[in-house]
Amino acid sequence: MRKEQDQTIATDEIQKIKVVPLLAVLLSGAFVAILNETLLNVAILPIMKAFGVEASTAQWLTTGYLLVVAVLVPVSAFLIQRYTTRQLFIASMSLFGIGTAIAGFAPVFAFLLLGRIIQAAGTGILIPLLMNVILAVIPPERRGRVMGVLGLVIMFAPAIGPTVSGLIIDYLSWRWLFLFVIPIAIISIWYGIVSLKNVTEVTNPKIDLLSMVLSTLGFGGIVFGFSSAGEGSGGWTDPIVFTTIAVGFVALLWFVIRQRHLETPMLDMRVFAYPMFSLAIVLMMIVMMTMFATMIVMPMFLLNVLAFSAVTVGLVMLPGGLINGAISPVMGYLFDKFGPRWLLLPGIVMMTLTVFLFRSLDSGATPVTIIILHSLLMVSVAMVMMPAQTNGLNQLPPHLYPHGAAIANTLMQVSGAIGTALFITIMTMGEQKFLAGIAQPSQAEKTAALAAGVEHSFTFGFALSLIALILAFFVRRVATTPAPDKGEGTL
């Protein structure tokens, strides 16, 4: 029976699959996996004290996680075609669970970092797998609402990460950030072993080793370089930073050229021949750059300019995350009913105005003002992300689903790292400009300088939002085509 489940099942058998339980277990696993991307943001300081490490070392807990995910996601297109849904889910959640246990009981920092890397390996496989399963079992006319639920996971989980982290650290220990997750991982693995079936076509493609190396150097180098610059470990003048970024872009260019000449490419670049997919990728990258950068810049502003505590910062940013999660499924339903443009245009207008208002924040800003602006930003993110992504993926033929999902997820990770680095760099430049000519600035002057730097960074975000607004006018609804028989399933 187990062996039979691990094989590609026939069309009539796939049609009997209950989609809701299938998606429920995949979404629950994905939620805790993505939650870990930002779960340690507030825990870095206690971890530094516990293990006696510097900030430049501790930041690898976040940078390393993003780096491994960025490296593995491109490989996911190959893995999804090579192995069954059941095999990949069990493998990814097992890796995530093992990594979580290692991190939770880590006696030294090296073991904690190892646990995070193993966690990331599971996440890098799981997220594209989930998206590909949705494309396989949900027909185009119903994908919007399901992708809206996926939006709840992808956008809501990292949004509440700092809040959850702040509360747990305040009342328990940073180790509980991992210990609470272990039972969820075990339950997900058990369900996968007992009842998960395959819903994708196994084609047994060949892997091109050079493509894998180039992908690792390309995406890994870009994420590492931009993350290092954004973390402030030497800035853009650090030889390691600009060298890794340069190597990353050269390797990525070589990777793209090679894929165009391979009979079975690791990532099929023909997905960019579909205009709505290409447009969706650019819009998603701009939104991810803005959102991830805001999640870094705003806590710094709240902690250092408004003098909020870590728990207060988490609570101030919580409503936006909750609202984003609540309305993401609604946006998916509205997408199915009205198409992308009626959501994208108002959403990007709202994002543009909100980012513009972020520019005016100063030391007199109230928590209510921050909550309102952050909530509006997260509403706009929900109105843009999933409609754009769903519309873009809908234009692809089924055999390109794994490649489109892998490329979308990879570029989302890369754009998050790039956006964070750019916003932090522009903020730092704004601080330096404000303090120019002041030999020994007072604390009040340093605080005012940071506020000026935040204004500069959001001015850049406002310019990005205007670009997204112009592009949104070119988005059109993709004609809905019947889903392949093998992928409709039953709700």
Image (cartoon, helix red, strand yellow):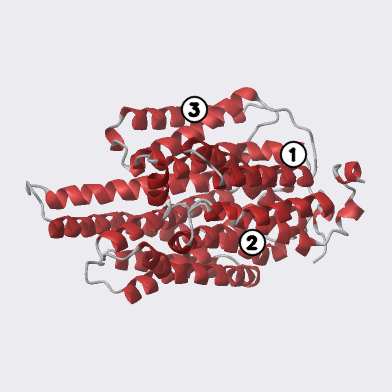
**Where 385 falls versus 48 (above or below)?**
below
Q: Looking at the picture, which amino acid does disc 2 mark?
A: Met
Which residue does the numbered mark 2 point to in the structure image?
Answer: 147
In the foreground, 57 or 157:
57
Q: Residues within 10 Å of mark 3 (few under 14, many from 20)?
A: many
Which residue does the numbered mark 1 point to in the structure image?
Answer: 81
**Where 416 falls versus 109 (above or below)?**
below
Task: Pick whichever of labels 3 and 1 is earlier in the sequence.
Answer: 1
Distance between mark 1 and mark 2 Cα atoms = 21 Å
Q: Is residue 372 left or right of residue 335?
A: left
Q: Residue furthest bottom?
A: 368
- Residue 291: percent from left, percent from top: 43, 57
Q: Residues within 10 Å of mark 1 (few under 14, many from 20)?
A: some
Q: Residue at x 90, y 48 (%)?
A: 10
Task: Pick whichever of labels 3 and 2 is earlier in the sequence.
Answer: 2
In the rendered structure, are the residues bearing label 3 and label 1 in contact, judged by CB atoms less than 8 Å apart? no
Q: Which mark is residue 251?
A: 3
- Residue 78: percent from left, percent from top: 69, 36
In the rendered structure, are the residues bearing label 1 and label 2 in contact, judged by CB atoms less than 8 Å apart? no
Q: Looking at the picture, which amino acid does disc 3 mark?
A: Ala
> Which image quarter: residue 25?
bottom right
Q: Is residue 384 left or right of residue 481?
A: left
Task: Pick whichever of labels 1 and 2 is earlier in the sequence.
Answer: 1
Distance between mark 3 and mark 2 Cα atoms = 32 Å
